[in-house]
Image (cartoon, rainbow, N blue to C red):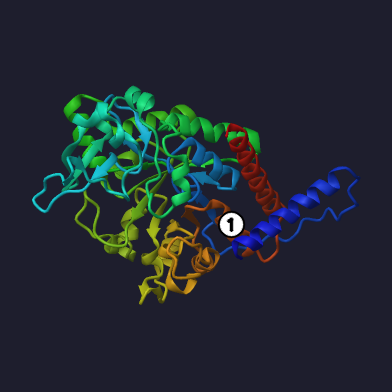
Amino acid sequence: MNMHAISVALCALAATAAATSAQALPAIDPSPLPAKVWNTLSGAAPLVIGHRGASGYRPEHTLEGYALAIAQGANYIEPDLVMTKDGELIARHEPLLARVELNANGSIKMVNGAPVLNRTDSSTNVWQLAKYADRLTVKNVDGVKTAGWFAEDFTAAEIRNDIRAQERLRDLRLGNNAYNNQFVIPTLQEVINLAKAKTLETGRVIGIYPETKHPSYFKNFTDANGLQRMEDKLIATLHANYGNDHNAPVFIQSFEVHNLEYINSKTDIKIIQLLNGSGNPFDDGRSYAELASAAGLDSIKTYADGVGSNTNLMIPLVGGKLGSPTQLIANAHQRGLAVHGWTFRAENVFLPNEFDSSADPAAYGDLSGQIKAFVDLGMDGFFTDQPLLGVAAVATLSAVPEPQTYALMLGGLVGVLSLARRQKRAN
């Protein structure tokens, strides 16, 4: 289903709701419709996870982006977590608030006396703030020399007072640049507060899906500065808000292994082991391919409830197109492990070639078609930058459309229109 078709369907639903609100509804058969039986571990529909919020439409890791993801029907919102100088957990994709390029010799690349900005990994305006020019530095992050402005060199108050979010993929998602320098950098607690408030407002349980970013790196930082370990801070915050409850609407995720084993010893909240398409965890000698094997999954099930898999581990690309599926999902399900796939993005540049709509890298292709290929294998949930399209894709895959699906889609439309009206008034 393309964007136009989705819009038509949603508008039709809205028109139907408006037309019937002023008159008595006809009698309906109270018998429940047969529910779609999904090929997932639980038999329920796959979860739609707002990847860093609705990052296809708003700068990532902002309360505004998370709120839009919820309005579009996401079941979960995902805050990546890094630490400030005073030990606060904030939502950013990397420790870097803005990144700059390096020369081959490891020095900062300069042009006309200014550092050259990395244009795909700079998510705030800190690089434009003269007062923080002296905090530009070079560090080693998990064995990789990296330069920029790092979150742990700023207090939470400094970040709150002066620093604002910018679109990270600034040369691809040009429309999102209109929101640059408007939104604050949220704390984990603020993300939780939003999810709880929207749960009450919408009547839907909105979960959170926090990721510990570079936990070994941050353990060195907290150990050196006498601060609470990232994992302990996260667990304490989650327990204060949700209790130590396996059924809480929370998944904790990480690309590292031993920090998840540590977290497992401290909480009953659900844990997801992230699996990249290449390389290995920084804190473990096994490759991600080994962890995705049957033996690796046997190990993972001792401390986690599922895996967050790169799409290539489920269906590898062959010549830019989807190849033959692996046994990852089947093997995981045999061991009682859920599989959440990442990352599903609508732009042609991110899609397998058969789903492209044109040669324009920023134009939207057939995201629904890509999602279907993975859901047909039994994928239990997926991270997407465009939750509206993800929700619509799941709806179209229902053998029998469920009433709650329509309500969810209509709620997403109403939320989007409401946000647009507020933006228009603000302008």
Instruction: Using the image, determine if residue 25 lies above or below residue 333.
Output: above
- Camera-nearest residue between 330 and 202: 202
Instruction: Using the image, determine if residue 194 lies above or below residue 300.
Output: above
Q: Residue furthest front?
A: 112
Q: Quadrant of residue 92?
A: top left
Residue at 66% x, 51% y: name it.
Answer: 409
Residue placed under numbered mark 1 in the picture:
45
Residue at 40% x, 67% y: name it.
Answer: 314
Residue at 29% x, 64% y: name it.
Answer: 289
- Camera-nearest residue between 212 and 174: 174
Measured as percent of width and height from the top left, residue 158 is found at: 32, 24
Q: Secondary structure at mark 1?
A: loop
Measured as percent of width and height from the top left, residue 48 is found at: 53, 52
Quadrant containing the C terminus in the rendered view: top right
Measured as percent of width and height from the top left, residue 247 is found at: 51, 41
Residue 176 visible in this rendered orientation of the protein? yes
